[in-house]
Amino acid sequence: MDGKTMVKMRRSARVSAAASSPSPGELRHEFARDEETGFWGFVYDPEDLTRRFVVELLLDGLPVRLARAECYVAELAAKGIGDACYGFSFALTPELVSDSRLAEVRLANDLGPIGASIRLNAAAEVMTDRRGLGAAEWMGGLRFRGWVRCPATESPMVRAVVDGEPIAEARASGFSHVGGTDNADLVKAFDLHLPTDYADGRVRRVHFITEDEWQLTVAPVTFVAFPDAVERFFASFSDTESDRLRGQMLDRLLPASAPFASYENWRKRWDESPSPIVTIDRPTAVVLIAGGNEEISLESLDQQQHDNWVAAALPALDGPGSFDPDELRDFLAHDGSDAEIVVFAPAGTVFDQLALKGLAQGLATIPQARTAYCDLEISGEDARPWPLALPAFDYERMLEQGYCAQLFAMDRATVLAALAARPTNLYRLFNSQFDNGAPRHRQIIHVPVALGRMPPLDVIVHSHLLAKASLTHLAARGIAAETKAQRGALLPAAGVTRKSRPRTLTVIIPVRNRRDLLAACLSSIAPVLTKARARVLVVDNDSSDADMVDYLEILKRSGTDVLAVPGAFNFARLNNLAVAACDSDDVLLLNNDIRAMDTVWLAEMQGRLAEPDVGAVGALLLWPSGMIQHAGVTLGASFAAQHIGNDRLASDPGYGDMLRVARECGSVTAACLLTRRSDYLDAGGLDEMRFPVNFNDVDYCLTLRSRGKRVVWTPAARLYHHESASRGRDQIGDKAARFERELRNLRNKWGEHLLEDPYYNPNLSLDAVPFSALAWPPRGRDPRVNRAPSAVELPPGF
């Protein structure tokens, strides 16, 4: 925007007269109907603003819902009341509302009413939606994310305003999830970066408003950003090591980012050649696989900084993406006879001028390296480049996506050995090096620099090539499997289904009250468990509700095992005692707020565990709104661990199509985690002392990986998850101190690995939404391998 334009700000509707102003010492509260089937309100204690209340909704005098009053209320924020998180809401079915005449809310376990009762046959015009128009939060650096409540077909513009001047804007064109178990709701989301002029180390405040001047932030959002990084900012005026370390820690906790749309400027600012390791003068052969655009590739090869190369374009064998292995052998025997390194790519690839040098340096990183691949660029509709930042080597993703076979280099001996398998496409050429079960990770180098721009791929054709190549490879390993070509958005996709041998299974479900959740969970998974002949072990942690106690007795009489574990809630301990009490081959850790969506999810997870080096398997978990709640866990975000996919709909392919294929990841959630009982016991189970509630699953998965096991997430196992519906959120109230303590333990034990997650690219931002922005600055771009994590063993009490 040019010039300075004053912007009018307007608050949303003020608190209605229904909110009483009682004398000091009494609670402040309100209760209203906000939609045909929804209700809203708030309650707080003006004498103790740290208190959070649990409220109960009654229809015609009968309790039907519970909720914790902890949602943000814009009207209360406008009045400066605490943190304004005192709201609650309920979403009911039309049938339930139409069959009732009176709604009221009371404090749970108390006779005190909240607000006035509501007659359900009242006119519709008295209903109001008071849950707020939207919100915005600072992600670190110059990045902000938020949401706007509006029809799904609309994408309103959101403006960032500093000192009355609009400085940036973005459309709320994405989706987000707000609410909880009873009021899950889809809203439109926006992602906005402020201009770089505001990265000056000054503390600033920003408001966010919609294009029709409705204010989303009652109080301004305070932020501070630095031009490069805090560490570099401190280094510019101080030689003190303590200042540098302080800046380094702040960079971990408040990472800066740049939008993908600014990739070209980002690359100009940060792009450097990989650090020299050895003098690169090894003769190189470049092999282009038929595509019809060889001239484009050859033109870019003429610009290489590495001059000792020869190239050939192999004709198609039986369609796009295929080649005759005899043609390749003949080329290497004659024109490429001196080549020590062979680089492969589809014809039409535009090579960066550092491509051959960078791949050669990658192979020189470690002596046992046999293959190196790199990051890529793709072209948008306007020919603008976009970054495809890839993980370190991921065997599962190789099988289902072939992501590492678009531009890679092999040493000559590896290529000649691969030709014995007679590969006819790049996917089979790449995966054939694992036919004999050789070590999969240390020999594969990832160069986290975009060294080439991909040509447009016929993803349907390439998906069929990939499916055939993966099936042939698994057969060579003696793995019984089926593969099926699927539809990728940018890259090929192939579903792999391994045939597992029958194994005994125990499903472990910790509970405390909430019969409704447990009954729904057991009902939804019953068909699959019956087919798998799996047992259920319910771990009861001091349920006191009479209805739940009766239900547990019913379960016992029907043959379901129930293990009573009294005492304070300790999720790790509950699962450890349950695993010790069962004798099955495998165990499935399952939350009581999980609901199955189909009858194939368990077989899919068991098939992944059929690989002997897989230690844990996780599933795709969705919120009731249709947003993704869990698609694996990435490490390092906000110097912690973050669920992948929280910003995506279930139908979204994800960054680099990552939500459409099975892949390895840093961790998976214990809300639905399949593992071998023997692996669980060998790893010591979940850590009851350091991680009783939070991060125990992350710690367990890292322990498995430190022992050479892989952790796999699969999108073919899909379930609903209400996420902490039975115990509430852990980052608020009296649970916040416990959460912070366990986060500190995670950072102390696995801190170095949190910043070096092999499945997360160092060019991607470490803010709270992984795979959604570029890191500013990148964290290091040297060639890397997929290394096993190493823990810092803490003495007792640390």
Image: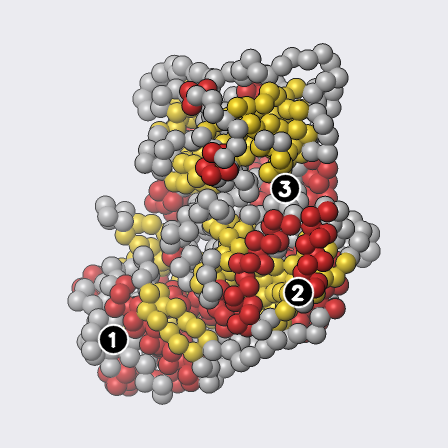
To which residue does mark 3 refer? 729
Nearer the observer, disc 2 or disc 3?
Answer: 2
Kindly report the distance in space between the C-alpha atoms of the residues bearing marks 2 and 3.
Answer: 33 Å
Label 3, secondary structure: give it. Answer: loop
- On screen, 679 above or below 78? below
To which residue does mark 2 refer? 558
Q: Which mark is residue 322?
A: 1
Q: Which mark is residue 739?
A: none
> How many other residues sit within 10 Å of disc 2, few (<14), some (14-19) or many (≥20)?
few
> How many other residues sit within 10 Å of disc 1, few (<14), some (14-19) or many (≥20)?
many
| Mark 1 residue type | Ser
Task: Say which residue appears at 26% left-offset and 86% top-offset.
Answer: 326
380 vs 737, nearest the viewer: 737
**Sequence-wise first label, 1 or 3:** 1
Kindly report the distance in space between the C-alpha atoms of the residues bearing marks 1 and 3.
Answer: 52 Å
277 vs 651, nearest the viewer: 651
Task: Say which residue appears at 38% left-offset and 47% top-offset.
Answer: 267
- On screen, 549 above or below 733? below
The location of residue 577, given as percent across then percent down, is: 75, 63
- On screen, 135 above or below 568? above
